[in-house]
Every structure is written in structure tokens, then in C-alpha cells.
Image (tube, grey):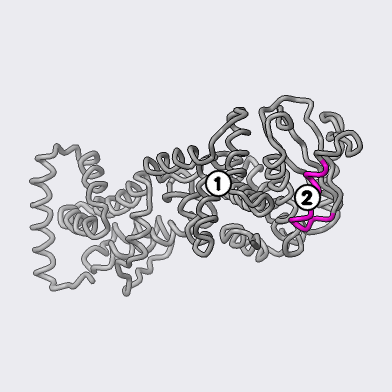
Amino acid sequence: MILKPFPFQIQLRDFFKKQSKTWNWFATPTVMHEQAEAFKTDLLKNVYRIDAAAEPQIYEVLNKAKDKLGIIIPVTIYQSQAYDGNNASIVFFDNEAHIILSGSILKLLTNDELLALLAHELSHVLLYNTENREFEITNNIINAIANDNHSELFYHETARLYQLYTELYCDLGALKVCGDLHTVIGTLVKLHTGLDKVSAESYLKQADEILERTEKGAKGETHPEIFIRAKSLQMFQNEPATYYEKIGKLVIGKNNLQQLNLFSKTEIYNFTKQLVDIVLKPKWTQSEYCIALYRQYFTDFKVNSNVMITQELKDSIDNSEENLKDYFAYVMLDFALCDTDLKEPFLGFILDLGEQLNLANNLKNCIKKELKLTDKQFKDSSLKYAAELNQILESEQEKTY
């Protein structure tokens, strides 16, 4: 079993590598050393160091995990003095690692479960040592940007997703080391519930029930919900060949206007441009008012005359939350209402587009709301809009597509 970064992590790494000045600054040893020292100063003030001589059994488990992951750097284990639930974290700097445990983990977990936990934490080191520490540099860059109060929200979402994928990577590391799916899942459930006895099999059934009710993806701030992590592990165990293709849908879920990341933001921008080009493809829609509105969206008026309703656009809309579908509907309605001389045929036109794009209900609701129409009024008006559209099409003999 070979651990490899997720496509999202690779995509973000490649994006930042193109920003050469930023990348080179974060990659310099001086900066990385300064970041390490900022943490190192406070470490010993807030923890109890567990010595190998005093607790040899714990370090036997640790060394087993290190051997299976091929990690040779020295690792020290600490118990946090503050109670912050049952949790574990790892800090890696200066070619040494420090694992901090909090809560009653050492009492709660069996040796096999402790092995899974320590393997998970050590997998952070494995990831950050991959490809000349490029994924550690990527992590530092996106977190620095996201923590800046002036940064846009999509950077925060990008950082969140990067951390979530890191946790899934480390879960796979735990599975690699302990070799038992139920042990890894049982460890996750124990840590999050505090129970000393759990059933991984029962929890997987519960995860399936949750997924049947929602397609929202993971929303956890620093760790995905454990049902996502459990399902991710099961997916890898059962279908390793297709795992990396399918995991994005499980983690990210449907596109959400309120949770755009660096890449989905660009994707939605491009689909918006495609949609507006479709709306303004017919010559009769390219009035002075509509062109002026176009320039508010994209600065330069340059409609792609070859634009089509593609399957990719339809799939993107289908894979969108209702708030994003409403956004697409309002973009079309924005153009339909901006020129009063074209209002009725334009409304007929976008209603036709809405049927083709599976946005009919969203458009109906938007039009009813903005024009203050009842259901009956909307139905009657729709017939009128269609008739007005047909008159234009018949008179100009213009083919829209």
C-alpha cells in the first residue's frame, strides 16, 4: 500500500509553485526554522514529557508505527496539561517530531488502537517529507493566507479542505500500519465519543444512513466528520483503484455558493461566463442595456459565438446546492429584466434555457418573487412570454443554437 497525496493537494501545490516569489520565500530554511521556533518556545511549558525509560510499552508501539512507515527521525510523546477532549497532534521540525496527547487516550485505547493513532500522527511527517517537503510548504502558504484578516473567504475554505484531505491521508497511513479497517474506525469513534467499547461495523452502517440523507460533504473546521472519515477508509479498503476519483464527491459534496474554494471559484466564474454567453448569443438579446450589463460582469463585451449548452455545464449545475442554482437563475433573470423593451420575450427565452439546464424551478421561484406573481399569474405570464419569444424567432429566423 503506497500512500500518495490527494488530487486536491497536488492541484494546490502546483498552483502555489507557479507563484515563484511566494513559494521561494516559504521554502527558505530560515523561514521554516523561525516558524518552528515560535512553537518550540511554548511546548515544554504546557505538556508533560513521557520518557521512553518510564513508559517503554508506549514507545514500543511508536517504534512499530515508525518502522512500518519508514520514519527514522526521533519522536517524543507528550501528555498535554490542559484538557481539550481526547485528541492528538504532531509537530514536526528540525528533523524531529513531537506528538502531543490530550485527555485520557492512554487509558481509553488498546495497544492496537494506540498503534493506529500514532501511525495517523506520524503520517503527517510522511506527507510533509514527500517530494522535498513541498506539501508542508503548501500547507504553510495556504494557512498563512487564510489566517490573514484581509483574505477572501475562498482562501479560508481552501485551507480547510487542504487540512481535511491531510487527515484522510493520515487515516490511510493508520490503515497501512495496523492493517485492520475496524481498528482504525474504532479508534476514531472512541476518540470522539469517549466510550471504551464501540462497534466499527455498527458505525459504518450509521455512516451509510447519514450519507443517504445528505450530500453536503464534510463541513468540519479542522477534521472531517468521522462518518466521512470512516466511509473514506471503507471506500479505500473496498475500491482502491477508483478511490482517488470518487473521494472528492464524498469530501466536498455539491458546489455551494457560500463555500467556494480557490478552484471552484474559478470554475463557477467560467460557468457564469458560459451561461451569460448563451443568454446573449441571439443577436436580438444584445441590446445596448444588455451589453452594458455584460460589461459589469466581465468588463469587455466579447460573446463567444460558438458557445453551447454543454454536458459539463449541465453536470456542474446538477452538482450544485440550491443557493448556487438560484445564483445561476438570477444571473439569467438579471439580463432578462435589464431592457424593458425585451422583457417579455427575454423571460420566455430564459425559461426555455431553464428547462434545458434543469433550472426551471429555480427560475420560476425567482421570477415569481421579483415580479410578485402568484402561481396562476406565473402560469398565464409564461404562456405570454413564450408567444412573444416565438414572434421574435419567427420574424428574425434566428437560430439560437
Q: Quadrant of residue 292?
A: bottom left
Q: What amino acid is labelled 2 in the image? A: Lys
| Mark 2 or mark 1, whichever is nearer to me | 2
Q: Which callout, 2 or 1, points at the residue further toward the start of the chain? A: 2
Q: Quadrant of residue 399?
A: bottom left
Q: Going by the picture, which residue comes out furthest to the right?
A: 53
Q: Residue at x 78, y 50 (%)?
A: 64
Question: Disc 2 versus disc 1: distance between alpha carbons?
Answer: 36 Å
The front one of 18 and 317 is: 317
Task: Tell me the quadrant of the picture where the C terminus can be found.
Answer: bottom left
Q: Which mark is residue 360?
A: none
The front one of 288 and 34 is: 34
Q: Which residue is mark 2?
A: 64
Q: Is residue 62 magenta?
A: yes
Q: Is residue 378 magenta?
A: no
Instruction: Tell me the element at label 1.
Output: helix
Picture coordinates of residue 331, whole percent (x, y) = 33, 52
Q: Is residue 203 left or right of residue 305?
A: right
Residues shaded magenta: 59-72
Q: Is residue 378 left or right of residue 167?
A: left
Picture coordinates of residue 266, whole percent (x, y) = 49, 58
Residue 198 visible in the current orientation: yes
Q: Which residue is mark 1?
A: 157
Q: Residue at x 19, y 53 (%)?
A: 347
Q: What amino acid is labelled 1 in the image? A: Glu
User: Is the residue 72 above or below the residue 204 in the image?
Assistant: below
